[in-house]
Image: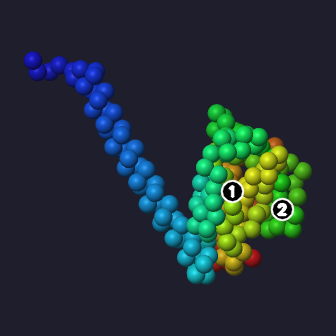
């Protein structure tokens, strides 16, 4: 008889196949994107291409590190059970403290704020620092690397946290606007230091 709905079991299988195909495509796309980003980071930093400014946020910071030969903790809670909580259900509200490296560029750009909390949500993290990178900030408590910077003349900065999630006027969260402005200036003017 025509005009009837498909049975739920049949629909479920078809839908599951579509979901599986979509997930496989997304995994492949994400892998290809990672390779493309890593190549761009290496070109900007290693080859000294002056017209690239790179700001990596969260996964982007991890990609910068890996592109420069560093390694990651694949799952912080299982590899470092005593670590600070870096992931929570309150996705865009989970905050923890960070410590800016003394004398680092972030400290010079942001000062030494009394309140240094950031919105940070990740289960992977930088384990071994890549070449030509320096640590700019660490998490309070476990010392997990939270910000990295390239040592070359190009703007290359990775923030493990999400400055875009800070609500205007929220004094409890570090105001990273000077960093975002520095990135835009570097992209326009091709300078960082």
> Residue 166 vs residue 143: left or right?
left
Answer whether labels 1 and 2 touch (C-beta < 8 Å). Answer: no
Q: Secondary structure at mark 2?
A: loop
Q: What kind of colouring is applied to the model shown?
A: rainbow
Q: Select label 1 or label 2 by which is in front.
A: 1
What residue is disc 2 on?
Answer: 101
Marks 1 and 2, the one that precedes in the sequence: 2
Crowd class of label 2 (few under 14; some 14 to 19; many from 20; radius 10 Å)? some
**Measuring 27% from the left and 32% from the top, which residue is drawn there?**
14
**Measuring 36% from the left and 44% from the top, which residue is drawn there?**
22
x and y, in percent, of residue 155 in the image: 67, 72
x and y, in percent, of residue 80 in the image: 71, 44
Q: CA distance from mark 1 to mark 2?
A: 17 Å
Residue 165 seen in this snapshot: no
Q: Split into 4 quadrants, where in the image is the N terminus?
A: top left
What residue is disc 1 on?
Answer: 127
> In the figure, 102 relative to 118: above or below?
below
Q: Quadrant of residue 10?
A: top left
**Measuring 88% from the left and 58% from the top, which residue is drawn there?**
112
């Amino acid at each position: 008889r025509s005009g009837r709905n498909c049975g739920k079991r049949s629909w479920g299988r078809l839908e599951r196949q579509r979901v599986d195909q979509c997930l496989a495509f997304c995994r492949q796309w994400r892998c290809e994107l990672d390779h493309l980003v890593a190549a761009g980071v290496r070109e900007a930093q290693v080859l000294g291409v002056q017209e690239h400014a790179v700001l990596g946020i969260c996964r982007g910071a991890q990609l910068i590190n890996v592109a420069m030969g560093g390694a990651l903790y694949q799952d912080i809670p299982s590899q470092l059970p005593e670590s600070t909580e870096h992931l929570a259900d309150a996705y865009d509200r989970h905050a923890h403290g960070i410590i800016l490296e003394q004398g680092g560029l972030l400290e010079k750009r942001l000062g030494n704020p009394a309140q240094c909390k950031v919105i940070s949500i990740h289960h992977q993290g930088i384990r071994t620092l890549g070449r030509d990178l320096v640590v700019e900030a660490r998490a309070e408590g476990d010392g997990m690397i939270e910000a990295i910077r390239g040592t070359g003349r190009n703007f290359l900065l990775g923030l493990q946290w999400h400055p875009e999630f800070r609500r205007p006027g929220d004094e409890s969260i570090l105001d990273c606007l000077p960093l975002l402005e520095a990135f835009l200036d570097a992209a326009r003017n091709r300078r960082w230091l």
